[in-house]
Image (cartoon, rainbow, N blue to C red):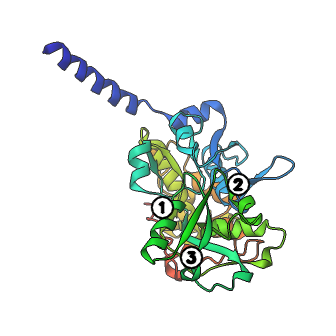
Amino acid sequence: MIKPLLAAAAALAFGAAGSADAQTLKTVQDRGKLICGVSQGIAGFSIKDDKGAWSGFDVDFCRALAAAIFNDPSKVEFVPLSAAERFDALKDRKIDVLSRNSTWTLGREEESDVVFAGVTYYDGQAFMTPKTSKATSALELDGAKVCVQRGTTSEPNAKNFFETNHVNYEIVEGDTGADIVANYLSGKCNVLTTDESQLFALRSQFPKPGEHMILPDVISKEPLGPVVRQDDMQWLNLVKWVNYALIDAEEMGVSSKTIDEALKSEKPAVKRLVGTEGDLGKPLGLSNAWAANAIRTVGNYGEIFDRNVGAHTRLGIPRGLNELWDNGGIQYAPPLR
């Protein structure tokens, strides 16, 4: 009986030590770059051009992380991942952080041994159909063939919506975003459903975007955000607080254009944010200029949103829920103090 107890105690001690010794930040620093998992190509969020350069909302978040760590937003490598492989890539340490349109759910944290580090984009599932359908609501899609991406929350959400509302439907699955777009444009389905932001992104790449409409129905809550492993609290806090710092910066009016003025500010909250007062970088393993470095090189939350997906981009997505809490939205960050 003693031997099994000793073995169990040893296993627990090893697990605790393994957790305590998990030093993602040190690994990243020793390597000299951050490895960030992104989508295989969603316009406005994470997409690679013909010269191999990545851009997008999720890409810029990783650049902000790199700037906070290295004071250099270019020190990041992007790894494109499918929906099916994204969490395994994180668990298997092929990436340091996942910044890819992934919905925060209890099941994903429990089953995949990962944890979400806040919400960077509040989204919801919607439907797109050709304007020739003349539909004004998803409730009018009786008999529709509906394209969804396998391995995402879109399929169960769609099934729940149609069955609850007694609307006949047929699911047409695809493995990637490219697959479901090809199926939709070829007529294998006449409805495309996924997160509303992704519908804006996909439509912007269509040969004739104006011939397709996104219906007003939003049928789910899809909080999207960066994901890390559960074994490293310091790394979770670092990723989480970079996210919050970008949001707090917008609320305080601190941007890439005003950062030099902010460094001279006498406002306590601004001084803590930019590192001229306090020692908030220490528990994160960073210099006190970590947030200022991210803001200077990548911008605050509003700048990142507007540059990649906002009203004046090809996607033209309204801020909506992603407006700050004091401007009609629900983006809200804890104070840095």
Residue 67 seen anywhere in this rendered image of the structure? yes
Secondary element at tag 3: loop
Q: Is residue 285 above or below residue 161?
A: above
Q: 234 or 277: which is nearer to us?
A: 234
Indicate left or right for 76 with 330 as reference. Answer: right
Q: Is residue 37 above or below residue 218?
A: above
Secondary element at tag 1: helix
Secondary element at tag 2: helix
Q: What residue do we see at 56% from left, 76% from top?
A: 323
User: Could you say which disc has been placed on residue 127 in the image?
Assistant: none
What's the residue type where badge 1 is placed?
Pro
Circle 3 packing at 10 Å, graded few (<14), some (14-19), many (20+), is many
Which callout, 3 or 2, points at the residue further toward the start of the chain? 2
Residue 46 lies, in percent from the top left, at 70, 55
Figure quadrant of residue 142: bottom right
Q: How far is the residue under mark 3 from the one under mark 1?
A: 28 Å
Q: What residue do we see at 24% from left, 22% from top?
A: 8
Which callout, 2 or 1, points at the residue further toward the start of the chain? 1
Report the residue marked by disc 1: 156
Q: Nearer the viewer, mark 3 or mark 1?
A: 1
Q: Is residue 80 above or below residue 16?
A: below
Circle 2 packing at 10 Å, graded few (<14), some (14-19), many (20+), is some
Q: 12 or 165: which is nearer to us?
A: 165
Report the residue marked by disc 2: 179
Residue 22 lies, in percent from the top left, at 45, 32
Which callout, 3 or 1, points at the residue further toward the start of the chain? 1
